[in-house]
Amino acid sequence: ASTLGAQAAASGRYFGTAVASGKLGDSTYSTILDREFNMITPENEMKWDTIEPSRGAFNFGPADQIVNHALAHGQQMRGHTTVWHNQLPGWVSSITDANTLRSVMDNHITTEISHFKGKIYAWDVVNEAFADGSSQHRSSVFQNVLGNGFIEEAFRTARAADPAAKLCYNDYNIENWTDAKTQGVYSMVRDFKARGVPIDCVGFQSHFGSGGPPASFQTTLSNFAALGVDVQLTELDIAQAPSAAYTNTVTACMRVARCAGITVWGIRDSDSWRSGESPLLFDGSGNKKAAYSAVLSALGTG
Ligand code: G3I
């Protein structure tokens, strides 16, 4: 196949990108989006500060714009993200009463996921809850006020709101198997599966340096998959976009049957949160870079 999405689909996978609603009117951007990608993650529009800027006041406009674009162009959606310590409004982070915060968190999850019910392939229910260099949860208002159980609470609430959506835990720096953070997330997923806490997938953000993924990346993906969850590469970008680093990343996914798909974190280098590192598959003018061809051919090895 001659596009990323079609090539991934040939092995039953998807190939997606992060999308910013404000760029949909840029025809260079939307032409590439609709030609190459069959999965979309809103880059910011489904985060708490946009969706519920003040308590009980929900703003779905920017996210709806992206979802409507996807529906009109036959693309699926990843929901990102219901519970995260960043892009969290001050009214939430200042809550100190556990009953209040639990009800606020559950209402946020229920209202957001219900709004998009039936239109989301997978939700990043909880994002980045583990601390770097540790197998423990990081400090956050959710952790500090609700305790360890907040992640389980969030997943149970999400399942009730849209039983058909896949529910993912999403994080970065969990790609190297021996890292404490990877082991912490692995233990959580193993525990959730053992106790019947609803979880269907783990998102590996995959924000890599120019060397690409750690040598153990495929091992990490298959070890998680063996717990009975899908694995997904959810925010891929690689400093300087070396072809070899992209090839190694895509190949690791292709070799794991339950690696469901790959999402790159933006279309053109100029769209990237790390644009200074030119980490994506298209240059600022929308031309395919060498890494594009590397990814297209690695996707063909499935
Ligand atoms: O929308 C405001 C705008 O009104 C304001 O004038 C402008 C001034 O700074 O800021 C705009 O908000 C920015 C927002 O992106 C939308 O452009 C924020 O400052 C900026 O912090 C925010 O950055 C996003 C970042 O998450 C925030 O944490 C990036 O676009 C987004 O790519 C990035 O994505 C995250 C994933 O969600 C989770 N994993 C890591 C990844 C990279 O940080």
Image (cartoon, rainbow, N blue to C red):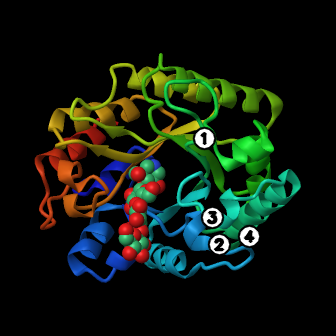
Residues marked 2 and 3 touching at CB (< 8 Å) = no
Mark 2 nearby-residue class (10 Å; few <14, some 14–19, many ≥20): many
Q: Which residue corresponds to the image point at 25% horizontal and 72% vertical from the top-left?
A: 29
Looking at the image, is mark 4 or mark 2 earlier in the sequence? 2
In the current view of this chain or complex, which residue is farthest to the top? 178
Which amino acid is tagged 3?
Gly
* Labels 1, 4: front one: 1
Residues marked 3 and 1 touching at CB (< 8 Å) = no
* Labels 3, 4: front one: 3
Mark 1 nearby-residue class (10 Å; few <14, some 14–19, many ≥20): many
Image location (x, y in percent) of residue 173: 44, 32
Mark 4 nearby-residue class (10 Å; few <14, some 14–19, many ≥20): some
Looking at the image, is mark 3 or mark 1 earlier in the sequence? 3
Would the CB of label 1 be found within 8 Å of ligand 1? no
Question: What secondary structure is found at the residue carrying circle 4?
Answer: helix
Which amino acid is tagged 2?
Glu
Residue highlighted by disc 1: 129
Residues marked 3 and 4 touching at CB (< 8 Å) = no
Residues marked 1 and 4 touching at CB (< 8 Å) = no
Rounded to the nearest angstrom, the CA distance separating label 3 from label 1 is 18 Å
Quadrant that contains the C terminus: top left
Which amino acid is tagged 1?
Ala
Image location (x, y in percent) of residue 158: 74, 55
Residues marked 4 and 2 touching at CB (< 8 Å) = yes
Q: Which residue corresponds to the image point at 16% horizontal and 38% vertical from the top-left?
A: 243
Residue highlighted by disc 3: 90
Residue 111 - label = 4
Residue highlighted by disc 2: 52
Image location (x, y in percent) of residue 165: 66, 56
Question: What secondary structure is found at the residue carrying circle 1?
Answer: loop
Looking at the image, is mark 3 or mark 4 earlier in the sequence? 3
Rounded to the nearest angstrom, the CA distance separating label 4 from label 2 is 10 Å
